[in-house]
Image (cartoon, rainbow, N blue to C red):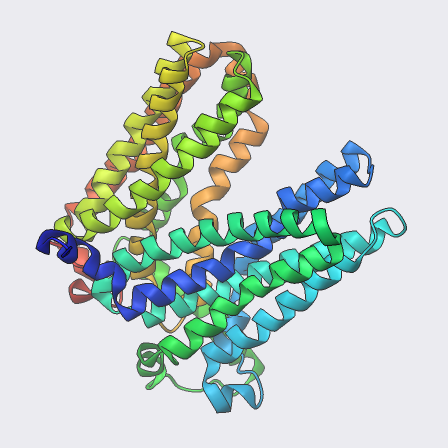
Amino acid sequence: MTTPPGSGRALAPFLARGPIGALLLGLASGFPFAMIAATLTTRLAEAGIDKRAITAFALTFLLYNLKFVWAPLVDRIRIPILSQAIGQRRAWLVLVAFLVMAAVVWLGAADPVGNLPMVVAAALTVAFLGATFDVVIDAYRIESLNPEELGAGSGMSQYGWRLGSAGAGALALVVAERAGWPLAYAAAALFALPALAAALLLGEPAARAAALADEPKPRTFRQQFSATFVAPIADFVGRPAGLLILLFILVHKLGDTLANLSLRLLLNELGFSKDEVAAYDVGFGLVATLLGIFVGGLLYTRLGMMRSVLVSLLLMAVSNLSFAGLALVGHSNLAMAAAVGFENFASGIGGVAVVAWLSWLCNLRFTATQYALLSALASVLGRFLSGTTAGSLIEALGFLNFYLLTTALALPGVLLFLLLLRREDVAALAPRGAAAANLS
């Protein structure tokens, strides 16, 4: 049976070497997070650790939000010997991959009953190295993809992250049931190996070497500090509409983040059982997200980057209305499936388009720093407001009006992006220009 020509053309962007490498990088990137998330929670609960102590481990995730602080070192420092042998980016990738594997094995070997502080230290180490692994992988992915591959590469990276996170967590549970937690964590650590396969497949990014070719080498400490920490920010702020771009990134996910982080409260309020939540919010939602990622890659190819971002912003804004509809309808599996399915589908599309756009914005001289900063900026406001005001807003407004509010909060991001889209110098917003953006 032959593949229809149309299907072949649709799949072709995802099957190129760059996107396949992005898939492998995503597989490796997702597993450290899983080791300190649900997997560690399950292990600590099984060991009889106090619930307050277990929830306190969530603070380790703050290191992922702070990774932009040390990301400049990944851009600037060359690993001795290894960088000369395989290149700066791959040297960092190989070094951090093995360090993450060692940290995960350490976390598995630590005994939460006999030495909980050791588990804390190991979890913090996994979080720090996992966040650093993200920094290295994001920079390597962006610099390895050809300009026209940014959309498909972003989609494949997200496929990989979700599969790696879920796969590592599932593998750990299966092995722990049969052979104990130390071996379970050691087995899950093997999920770092796809990153090494990607390093072999993709090689050292030539685009970054070209970007650094004419850069003068800093000589004094002051020059080194400026080149490492100041120059990446100055480069971004100094672009046309640089501050407007930063404002858009700060607010564009505000409504979506508030809606998503409060969804389980709504489901509990409406009386959905754990089985119903597992089937529809987790299972059906994952399928919808994966489908959205695939469609997002197709939209990027057909519409171009800027238009696909605009479409995704509109879909994510409208998707919040589906939660308002669920709040209005009440306990209905069909309504929950529709709301969760539409929201996850829209988020999958948005993830591809927006990640591709953020990748395009990065100057290849500062890829690790700028992408880490932009990705942190995209989530910080929504997470802060969710933790400080979402509960009181729900109590004051009720769920229906709260989700109508989150829809309204998505509109400033749409309007700001329309301002960017209308600029005559839109190609100058990023160093790689129109040729790299598929701006049509």
Quarter of the image where the C terminus is located: bottom left
| In the depicted structure, whether residue 79 falls above or below residue 176 | below
When asked about the image quadrant of residue 121, the answer is bottom right
Residue at 48% across / 24% down in the picture? 263
**Residue 149: x %, y % from top left:** 25, 63
* Residue 262 visible in the snapshot: no
Numbered marks: total: 0
Q: From the viewer's perspective, is 72 left or right of 285?
A: right
Quarter of the image where the N terminus is located: bottom left
When asked about the image quadrant of residue 269, the answer is top right
| In the depicted structure, whether residue 236 falls above or below residue 312 | below
* Residue 89 visible in the snapshot: yes
Q: Nearer the viewer, residue 6 or 97?
A: 6
Q: From the viewer's perspective, is 212 left or right of 399?
A: left
**Residue 73: x %, y % from top left:** 54, 72
**Residue 292: x %, y % from top left:** 30, 41
Residue at 50% across / 63% down in the picture? 135
Residue at 80% across / 57% down in the picture? 110
| In the depicted structure, whether residue 178 falls above or below residue 91 | above
In the orientation shown, which residue stands out farthest toward the front?
A: 1
Q: From the viewer's perspective, is 185 left or right of 254?
A: right
Residue at 41% across / 16% down in the picture? 333
In the orientation shown, which residue stands out farthest toward the right?
A: 114
Q: Nearer the viewer, residue 148 or 436?
A: 148
Q: Nearer the viewer, residue 83 or 1?
A: 1
**Residue 29: x %, y % from top left:** 50, 59
